[in-house]
Amino acid sequence: MPVGTVIILGGRGMLGTDLGKACRSAGIDPMIYDLPEFDIGRRDHLEQAILPGSTVVNCAAYTNVEKAESEPDLAEKINAQAVGYLAETARTRDAYVIHISTDFVFDGDLDRPYAETDAPNPVSVYGSSKWHGEQALSHSDARCCIVRVQWTYGHGGTNFVKKILELAQSRDHLKVIDDQIGSPTATTEVARVLVEMLSMQEKPTGLFHLAASGYTSRYEMARFVLDVKGIPISVQPCKSSDFPTVARRPLNSRFDCSKLEQLLGRSLADWKEPLARFVEEL
Ligand SMILES: NC(=O)c1ccc[n+]([C@@H]2O[C@H](COP(=O)([O-])OP(=O)(O)OC[C@H]3O[C@@H](n4cnc5c(N)ncnc54)[C@H](OP(=O)(O)O)[C@@H]3O)[C@@H](O)[C@H]2O)c1
């Protein structure tokens, strides 16, 4: 069935770039908006961008987790206040919104994968700004769904995989934390699911968790990446406390994705094969 106009906000970021490609592969020609010509924090820009009856995927975000701790107002403006403007504009234009959010809305203290019914409790400025954005959208009357993703990597941005390979070029051994666990998830896989969702005859609403199946630690992930690349470097496990950061990060980022799998009528792919392919492409 025809999907209509698809608009990607933050369309030149890591996820937005792969979403644009996935749309084009599915025969959809999306409209791409991003900085510098489009600022989601400006109502007038949103009013110009959001067309009546369109589908808007919001990948635009303030994503620098460390810097957000010293720029809380800017993080809140982009990740929360602007999402409120987006909700209002979408409601008045009867546009449908898919908004991307994050595992950082949780504290990571749970000893099982997080479900959509678990209560958020962000422990960083970034996480709290994203949680406020979710609330602005879900408390509005806009037709929308929120898709939380975690541990994403892709060609169009900086990420853990690229950092490990960069470090491996200048060091003879690495120390990597083994007390943070999650599911490395390719932005190409996220994009594929988003295209399936926005192509559905009945547009999904509500909250969904999206991650590759299976999980691992940052330490095991680094070893996997280096093995695939054939880099024989020694890697030692350590704890998050060995690498103090300004922002606190959740130790457990695992998602229960059964609600989304039921919607899609299929299982989500395991994390290993897409990661191996990505590493080989680098
Ligand atoms: N990367 C992860 O591991 C991860 C994990 C969980 C959730 N997420 C979520 O996934 C979504 C996509 O993020 P990503 O990983 O693709 O990060 P990204 O590469 O940083 O993409 C974000 C995009 O938003 C743009 N942007 C920033 N401020 C803007 C503004 N005021 N107006 C318009 N555009 C603006 C950025 O432009 P500039 O580059 O010019 O700033 C960038 O193109 C976000 O909602 C993020 O919170 C990411």
Image: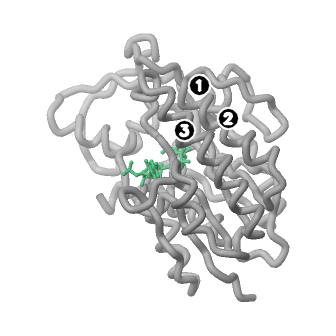
Residue flagged by tag 1: what amino acid is it?
A: Pro
Q: Nearer the viewer, mark 2 or mark 1?
A: 2
Residue lying at the far front in this picture: please name it. Answer: 44
Residue flagged by tag 3: what amino acid is it?
A: Lys
Question: Badge 2 is on which residue?
Answer: 131
Mark 2 residue CB less than 8 A from any atom of ligand 1: no
In the displayed structure image, the side of residue 170 where residue 33 appears, left or right? right
Question: Badge 3 is on which residue?
Answer: 77
Q: On screen, 102 above or below 48?
A: above
Q: Nearer the viewer, residue 216 or 52?
A: 52
Q: Earlier in the sequence, mark 2 or mark 3?
A: 3
Query: CA–CA distance between discs 3 and 1?
Result: 23 Å
Question: Badge 1 is on which residue?
Answer: 250
Q: Label 1: few (<14), some or many (≥20) within 10 Å?
A: many
Tag 2, which secondary structure? Answer: helix
Image x and y of residue 86, in percent:
65, 55
Tell me which residue sits at (63%, 66%) in the image.
56
Q: Label 2: few (<14), some or many (≥20) within 10 Å?
A: many
Q: Label 3: few (<14), some or many (≥20) within 10 Å?
A: some
Q: On screen, 93 above or below 26?
A: above
